Image (tube, coloured by chain):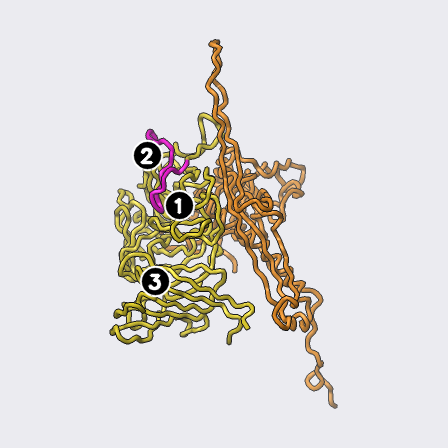
Amino acid sequence: MTEYSRMAKGNFTVSGPAATPLSAVVNLPFIPDYVELWNYSNIKTAATHSVTRAWWDVNLLDGTNNPTMLELYAGSATSTVFDTIQTNGISTFSAGQLLQFGPTYSHAIGDFAITKASPAQITTTVAHGLNSGDVVMFEGLFQSATTGMPQINGIPFTVTVTSSTVFTIPWDTSGSNYTVFNTATNTGNIGSFKKVLYPYLYFPGTSFISAITLGATTTVSTTDAHNFVVGQEVAFRIPQAWGPVQLNSLPNTLVPGSPVYGYVVSVTDYHTVVVNINSTAFTAFNVNQTVASLPGLSYPQIVAVGDVNTGGVIISAGSPLYPSPNYTPIGTTNVSTINGPAIRGSFVNNTSQGFVIGAGTAAVDTTSSIMTNGNIIYWHAYVHDFGKP
Amino acid sequence: MSITTTGNLGPMILQSLAPAMLYVPTPTMNYITICDKVSMPANGGTTCRFMRPRALTPPTIQLGNSGIDPPAQVPQRDIIDAQMAFFGTGCIINEQVILQDQEGVLAWVSERLAVAMRQAEDLILRDYIVSAASEINAGGGSNGFNPTNLGVSDFSLVATTLDTNNAYKFMSGIEGMDRFGTGPVRSAYFMLSSTELQSDFDALTGSGFLSQWNYPTNASALPSEYGSVYNIRILASSEAPVARNAVTNNAGTTTDLYYNTVVGKQAITHINQDGYSMNLIYRDPYYSGMLAQNATLAVKFAQAQALTQDTAIRNLLSTRLSNLGV
């Protein structure tokens, strides 16, 4: 009898960089206690170092670790063996509250360095464990007491992963006030970063600005996903030190008290939008802030304040007739929420729960991961009425 | 002599239940307090839409003597949309629990569910504000972090910003009275802050902070009101948003980051649908399985939220000056 049990199944095709272990998030109306999945692509076409099946039980503990079990082709493409993923395999999540973070990466784990470049490139000495689209925040980026890159402390950045030890962030650190940062060589080996676990529980919202291109229209780049749509009404908050304060919604010299807003007329990608404000004569954006300005330095922001849309998300091949609002964590990839349909640009709740298929690799056959680009995955998830212990 | 003790004649029933339940420590729910409240109608779709007219340009140019009318203005408006979301939780309680437990299980579980629902309302609003309202880093403190701890100039800066934005204050001032140790209180916005910052506020006594106890009258003070600084009255709660170990200074010292939300009227609106807020649902065991063994108790509610005056709200981010107790 399973009066209160929950069962769910589904399938998807993995999308991401080729030949790289990839992860996926599966939203469910419950948090499962058991998950299993088949990698149909690897079952159909046997190849060495490919996982055919993975399963996970919340109560299976190896010490304090909760590993994922695997069936895979290891050194042979004719017979499968069993293995495990000890970290970053299948796990559950409950994304209900903000300000939750993953483990801190710091000198205690491995060093990392940041280049003076645009985009800034981060190289770690130990695998960073991030995926493109993840959001991280840095802290303590002081090379010495007065140098380094502390100007980017506390800013949420979307990462673009180029290898297991290298990623970039959308910020220009090539300016004269930034000094190459390295936790291996700086004073006290300070500096860290950590993943923001649930950066988009509510959207659209406020995003930090990394660049502004002035012109007949204004092109704005943000440090993480803005999740704006065409027709989004936006306001700017540009502190004096950053330049184009003329974009700010207030004060308004012509109609005192009346905020000046702009509308998004084009969405380039997850972190760039074009706003219909003619900023030709405005002060240039200055990302080259000094370290000395830090205590009290506020950051430039673009804020969603409304929209002028009258319809919901447009249907596409395979979509429901009335698609739910979606967000764009990286590139131009849209991720649906679990909501019903809404006006595009609405303030939306994006809290959710379910399970994550991680990008971890097998403990013995260390080149195998659960899935890579193009794999077709069929999954089942359960929460059981009754279990022992 | 043989003395009969509880060692050889102990009570047959060792325990009795104290007559009252102990209280459940529960944070003060401040975020719902400062919200405007709107109810979407039934059959009203998924999305609540707000409209705010824009100001027309004041006609400061004289007509002159040409007899020609000036060009007409085109009225404009701002539109704000918020999508309704539904929430709920519940408990499945076996009839043997109800039958055999000494306390009124259904009563206290009902109460807990109701409180959980109210707290969910507040936490949703809290996190929505963190994600949607723009931020100002405190710089008036002295602890060297960015942001710094709160200094009185930070209160002044944010109040000035909201005043310049023509935000409406929540509270009118309290006139001074001839009472020892009290002082007048300015008309004020609210700042929703953490109880962990109360010692920092106390440290500002004499340089701008006025404890609620030192108001001429605290008749208008809210239960969670800790005091005021200039044009801001501080409501403290232990559930205010804090990012732990989120700020590190140049000496490698790490501290917590606080989101102090300063708001004027109508800055944020809480929306329900057709009075759907707060449904407590009890289903008798009769409705479960063949043997009718399990009752269910649940709550559900509908809620959306929107920044309805983005100019009247700022998150004033700060760190802390004082150490925390444990």
Name the secondary structure under disc 1. Answer: loop
* Separation of residues labelled 3 and 1 (CA atoms): 30 Å
Which callout, 3 or 2, points to the residue nearer the camera? 3
The residue located at (37%, 66%) in the rendering is A89
Q: Which residue is mark 1?
A: A226
* Residue A222 coordinates in the image, percent (x, y): 36, 44
On screen, residue A152 above or below A74: above
The chain letter of the orange chain reads B
Residue A214 is marked as 2
Quadrant of image for the N terminus of chain B: bottom right
Provide the residue span drawn in magenta. A263-283
Q: Where in the figure is residue B247, as x and y percent of width and height? A: 41, 52
For chain A, the rendered hue is yellow
Cα distance, mark 3 to mark 2? 44 Å
| Magenta-span inclusion, residue A14 | no
Report which quarter residue B229 is drawn in.
top right
Question: What amino acid is labelled 3 in the image?
Answer: Ile
The magenta stretch spans residue A281: yes
Q: Which residue is mark 3?
A: A376
Q: Earlier in the sequence, mark 2 or mark 1?
A: 2
Q: Chain of mark 1?
A: A
**Considering depth in this image, is B325 or A153 the residue closer to the camera?**
A153
- Name the foreground residue: B73 vs A185: B73
Q: Residue furthest bottom?
A: B1
Tell me whether circle 3 and circle 1 mark residues in contact (CB < 8 Å): no
Which of the 4 quarters of the picture holds residue B114? bottom right
Q: Amino acid at mark 1?
A: His
Badge 3 and badge 2 both on one subunit? yes
